[in-house]
Amino acid sequence: MIKVVAKNFAKENKIDKILELAKELVEKTVKEEGCIKYEMYQNTKEPTELIMLEEWETEEDLNNHMSSEHFKRIVPQMAEYLRKKGEINIYKKVI
């Protein structure tokens, strides 16, 4: 199993735009083969910090997701509304 934590830092007045795009991304992604979980969370102390928590069966499934039409279309649109570059960390279960 692969887990992904993708942290995004929204421009304060653009959170709604990111959430609108993220909604479509989530709706399409959860239908992908190998997707176990794909959810966005908002930091309660810093509302401009949005985290996408993902679970994938395999790294290949994650790679297929990042090559999908909707990912390649939506993620660059979301980037327009970020105040700084996001962080992506990929984890594998060890215990």
Image (cartoon, rainbow, N blue to C red):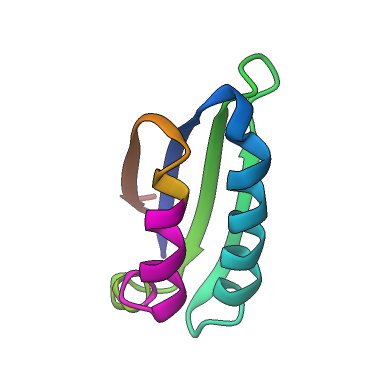
Nearer to the camera, 87 or 53 = 87
Q: Seen from this angle, which residue lies furthest top?
A: 45
Residue 4, image x and y in percent?
Answer: 41, 51
Please tell me whether the stretch drawn in magenta is mainly helix, strand or loop. helix
Is 75 within the magenta? yes
Vertical placement of 32 versus 5: above or below? below
Nearer to the camera, 2 or 81 = 81
Image quarter hosting the N terminus: bottom left
Q: Seen from this angle, which residue lies furthest bottom?
A: 33
Vertical placement of 38 versus 60: above or below? above
Task: State the image quarter where residue 59 is shown.
Answer: bottom left
Q: How many marks?
A: 0
For the point 65% across and 23% down, the residue is: 47
Vertical placement of 67 versus 21: above or below? below
For the point 43% across and 34% down, the residue is: 82
For the point 53% across and 47% down, the residue is: 52
Task: State the image quarter where residue 23 is shown.
Answer: bottom right
Residue 54, image x and y in percent?
Answer: 50, 56
Residue 15, image x and y in percent?
Answer: 63, 35
For the point 59% across and 34% down, the residue is: 14
Q: Which residues are magenta?
A: 65-77
Is 76 within the magenta? yes
Vertical placement of 4 versus 26: above or below? above
Residue 12, image x and y in percent?
Answer: 59, 23
Horizontal relation, residue 53 to residue 13: left or right:
left
